[in-house]
Amino acid sequence: MRTERSDTQRRNTADGDGAEKLLTVEHEPAAGGGQRSILYPPSSTGSELESNWLAVSSDLLVSLDDVQ
């Protein structure tokens, strides 16, 4: 995957003492123009990474802070 930027979303744990990684997000140009975002678990490697991902239009993503 060729990316322009990579982000990791985090969520606070129930006790507030740490953060848990949820998904890694990579943004890349979409075939029809604009950008698409590839989301996958940060611990995935090799064949797991090839099968455990989701691609969506970057316009459809919202910040976790906006929904909490």
Image (cartoon, helix red, strand yellow):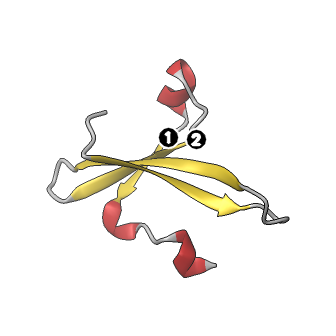
Assign the N terminus to one quadrant of the image. Answer: top left
Are there few (<14), some (14-19), or many (20+) residues within 10 Å of tag 2? some
Residue in view at x 16 percent, y 54 percent: 32
Label 2: element kind: loop
| Kind of residue at badge 1 | Trp
| Relative vertical location of residue 10 with respect to residue 50 in this rendering, above or below | below
Label 1: element kind: loop
Q: Position of residue 33 (x, y in %)?
A: 14, 56
N-terminal label among 2 and 1? 2
List the single residue furthest toward the top.
Answer: 46
Q: Is residue 34 left or right of residue 65?
A: left
Residue in view at x 77 percent, y 61 percent: 13
Q: Position of residue 40 (x, y in %)?
A: 52, 42
Q: Position of residue 7 (x, y in %)?
A: 43, 51
The residue tagged 2 is 41
**Dot label at residue 53:** 1
Are there few (<14), some (14-19), or many (20+) residues within 10 Å of tag 1? some
Say if mark 2 contacts mark 1, CB within 8 Å.
no
| Relative vertical location of residue 30 with respect to residue 66 in this rendering, above or below | above
Q: Is residue 35 left or right of residue 68?
A: left
| Kind of residue at badge 2 | Pro
Q: Is residue 10 left or right of residue 27?
A: right
| Relative vertical location of residue 16 with respect to residue 23 in this rendering, above or below | below
Nearer the observer: mark 2 or 1; the answer is: 2
From the viewer's side, name the closer residue of 21 and 61. Answer: 21
Residue in view at x 51 percent, y 29 percent: 49
Spatial CA span between label 2 and label 1 = 8 Å
Assign the C terminus to one quadrant of the image. Answer: bottom right
Residue in view at x 22 percent, y 50 percent: 30
Q: Position of residue 6 (x, y in %)?
A: 37, 47
List the single residue furthest toward the front.
Answer: 17
